[in-house]
Image: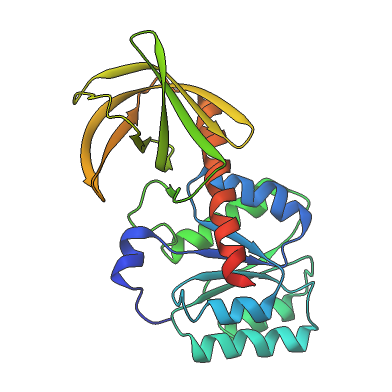
Amino acid sequence: MGNISASSEIQGRKIFFLYPPAVVQNQIIAELVQQEFEVYITKNHKALGRILKKYSDSIVIANIDEGMSEAEWEKWIIDIKNTLPDVSVGITSTNKDEELKNKYINSVQVHCGFTVLVPDINKVTAHILENLKAVNAKGRRKYIRATMENETSASMNLSLNGTFVKGEIKDISVVGISCAFETDPELTKNELLKDIQIKLQSTLLKVEAIIFGSRIDDNIKTYVLLFTQRIDPDARTKIRKYIQHNLQIKMDAELK
C-alpha cells in the first residue's frame, strides 16, 4: 500500500462496505458509525471502482459472497490494487475455507484482513475494528461532521428571553453545531444556552450548549455551539445516525 495522504491522516479515510449482508449492515456498520468511523454502503462494484479514483486512499470491505463469482472478485480486487495502490481492501465471507483465506491474505495481499462471518457478531465486529485500526482508518479525526448546505431535513430553535429563535444549521457533529440566524441574536462567547431544540428529519432533540465563538461566512455571522457534557447519550446516538445518513445520501448521488 502506498502513502496515505496528509488530508486522510488528519481527516480519516472513507470506508466502503461493498455488497454487505444484512447482519453487517444492521449491526456492524451501525456500531462503526457510533465509534465515529466514516462508513458508506454500496451494492455496485462498477460505480465504486469509478468513485475510488476520486477518493483514492479509501478502504473497501468487500463481501465476496455476493455480486460476482469468486474468480471475478479476485480479478476486481487485483485490478483495484494495481491501479489504486493507496486503496486498502478487506474481505468478508461466510466461507471458512483456509485456502481461500490464505489466497487473499498471502497471494492477493489484501491489507485489511479476511473476516469470516461467524454467528458471534461481537467477534466479527472486533476483527473488523482491529483491521481498520491497522490501516489508520480514523486518522487523527475524533468526530465525523456533516455539512448542511441547502439541507431541508434539519433545523434548530433556541429559547431566548422567552421566545424561540429559529436558526439554520451549517454543520453538525456529536460535539456541537455551527448555525446562523436571519436576525443576529448577538450571542456572547461562553454564554450557556439551556433550551435548544434540534430537528433531524423526524427526530427532535433537546440539548444545551455553550457559545464557543463566531465567524463571518459570506457576510453572515455563524455561531459555533458546543454541546455540554449533560447531553443525553441517546441524543449522541441519534446525531451519529443522522450524520451517516446525510453522508450516505451525498455519496449515493456521486455513485449514480
Question: Which residue appears at 52% of the width and 38% of the height?
Answer: 154
Front residue (pair 36, 128):
36
Residue 107 location, quadrant: bottom right
Can I make out residue 185 in this image? yes
Q: Residue furthest top?
A: 162
Q: Residue furthest left?
A: 189
> How many numbered discs sit on the rendered protein?
0
Can I make out residue 128 in this image? no
Image position, residue 127 (x, y; %): 59, 57
Image position, residue 211 (x, y; %): 26, 27
Q: Is residue 5 shown above or below 187?
A: below
Quarter of the image for the N terminus: give it. bottom left
**42 relative position to 204: left or right:** right
Q: Is residue 27 shown above or below 78?
A: above
Question: Which residue appears at 28% of the width and 18% of the height?
Answer: 192
Quarter of the image for the C terminus: give it. bottom right
Question: Which residue appears at 68% of the width and 77% of the height?
Answer: 45
Question: Which residue appears at 74% of the width and 48% of the height?
Answer: 120
Image position, residue 18 (x, y; %): 67, 69
Image position, residue 104 (x, y; %): 64, 81
Residue 216 location, quadrant: top left
- The colouring scheme, among rainbow, by chain, secondary structure or one colour, is rainbow
Q: Residue furthest front?
A: 183
Residue 68 location, quadrant: bottom right
Front residue (pair 98, 152):
152
